[in-house]
Image (cartoon, helix red, strand yellow):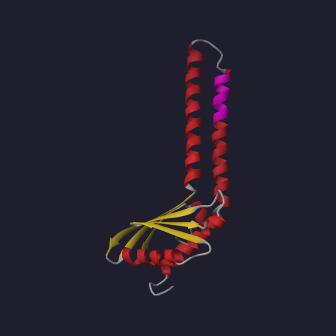
Amino acid sequence: MYPENEITLRLRFKQDIQENSTSLLSKFEKNSNIKSENFTIKMSDNHIWLDIVPSKRKYWTPHLHLELEPKSDSETHIRGLFGPDPTLWTFFMFLHFILAALFFIFGAMAYSDYILKNSITVDISIMVLMTIFWFSLYYLAKVIRKKGSQQMKELDVYFNTIIKSTNNDT
């Protein structure tokens, strides 16, 4: 990451490292075998997940997903994504889907009632309520992201420590 960018405002990042991907993968592999008090590392091919240990995890705890793409024999392109716990993410997406579905259903009902010259007050009221709930979900997501920003910074420091280490370090 670049120091002039605030990590909480930039959840995705790209970084080019002057080191081949095999060497970088071996650094993460070596660190995954070292027991850490604060972090865990999971790897699959060129994908790496950095997590906070379960004993220090809260519902807002982020994780860092890295994808290493070889650019040349001596350079690697890293794509990083800070994100919430997959269970929390799935729950939020489910709620967004339900709110959108209800909004469209009541929108169709409001249109039908309008064409039939019936009252559309209830339909419009529910659509407004769904919009308020949607903004509430957005606000809640921002609060959760802010609560997790310190752990996000810790993950970023850990990531950069591994990247800057040499293969001889333990």
Residue in front for this viewpoint, 39 or 72: 39
Residue in front for this viewpoint, 92 or 6: 92
Residue 105 in sight here = yes
> Looking at the rendering, which quadrant does residue 156 occupy?
bottom right
- How many marks the image carries: the answer is 0
As drawn, 22 above or below 134: below
> Looking at the rendering, which quadrant does residue 83 occupy?
bottom right
Q: Is residue 125 magenta?
A: yes
> Looking at the rendering, which quadrant does residue 57 occupy?
bottom right
Can you give x and y, in whole percent of width and height, for residue 158 in the image? Answer: 56, 74
**Residue at 45% from the left image edge and 75% from the top image edge:** 29
**Residue at 66% from the left image edge and 32% from the top image edge:** 128
Question: Is 60 placed left or right of 93 in the picture?
Answer: right
Residue 17 in sight here = no
Magenta span: 122-130
Can you give x and y, in whole percent of width and height, for residue 150 in the image? Answer: 65, 67
Residue in front for this viewpoint, 152 or 34: 34
Question: Is 48 placed left or right of 73 in the picture?
Answer: right
**Residue at 50% from the left image edge and 74% from the top image edge:** 32
Q: Is residue 77 magenta?
A: no
As drawn, 29 above or below 100: below
Q: Residue furthest bottom?
A: 168
Majority secondary structure of magenta residues: helix
Can you give x and y, in whole percent of width and height, for residue 24 in the image? Answer: 42, 76
**Residue at 66% from the left image edge and 39% from the top image edge:** 133
